[in-house]
Amino acid sequence: MKRGGGRRYYRPEDVALLRRIRGLLYDDGYTIKGVQKLFKQNGGQIPEPNAAGAPVEAQATDGGTGAETEAQPAGLSPRQRGELKALLGELEDLRDVLRGSTK
């Protein structure tokens, strides 16, 4: 909702939803597409985490191909994600070196 001067005001439930989405994206490792699937599958609601801290699993068909995909995170800790990013950087550097030597 907008008020005078163009300022936006958000309901507490809107702020809670945004925080939940942010948690799924940054803490739980979901992609934007994965969060969108969760949102659609649960009638416009984001499920609360279960006792293990992970969101309730949801199933969705994969673009009409008949293959089932799960809208769940990769299950990596922030430390593991950091290690993978570092490894990816090293691999990209090696690729660049190899491409430079073949020119």
Image (spheres, helix red, strand yellow):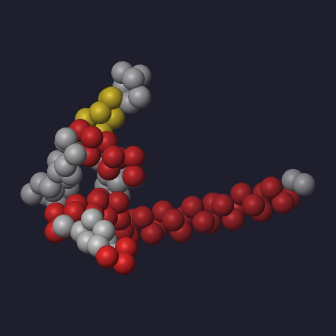
User: On the picture, is 91 further left or further right than 7?
Assistant: right
Q: Residue at x 87, y 53 (%)?
A: 102
- Where in the figure is residue 82, as x and y percent of width and height? 45, 69
- Where in the figure is residue 45, as x and y percent of width and height? 19, 49
Among the 4 quarters of the image, the one containing residue 94: bottom right
Marker count (numbered): 0
Is any atom of residue 31 visible in this view? Answer: yes
Q: Residue at x 16, y 68 (%)?
A: 12
Pick the front one: 86 or 71: 71
Q: In this view, does 40 lie above or below 35?
A: above
Pick the front one: 60 or 44: 44
Q: Tell me the quadrant of the picture where the C terminus can be found.
A: bottom right
- Where in the figure is residue 1, as x and y percent of width and height? 27, 65
Q: Residue at x 18, y 67 (%)?
A: 11
Q: Residue at x 66, y 61 (%)?
A: 92
User: On the picture, is 81 further left or further right than 59?
Assistant: right
- Where in the figure is residue 53, as x and y percent of width and height? 17, 60
> From this viewpoint, which residue is outermost toward the bottom?
5
> From this viewpoint, which residue is outermost toward the front?
4
Pick the front one: 87 or 49: 49
> From this viewpoint, which residue is outermost toward the left?
51
Pick the front one: 19 or 89: 19
Among the 4 quarters of the image, the one containing residue 51: bottom left
Is any atom of residue 23 visible in this view? Answer: no
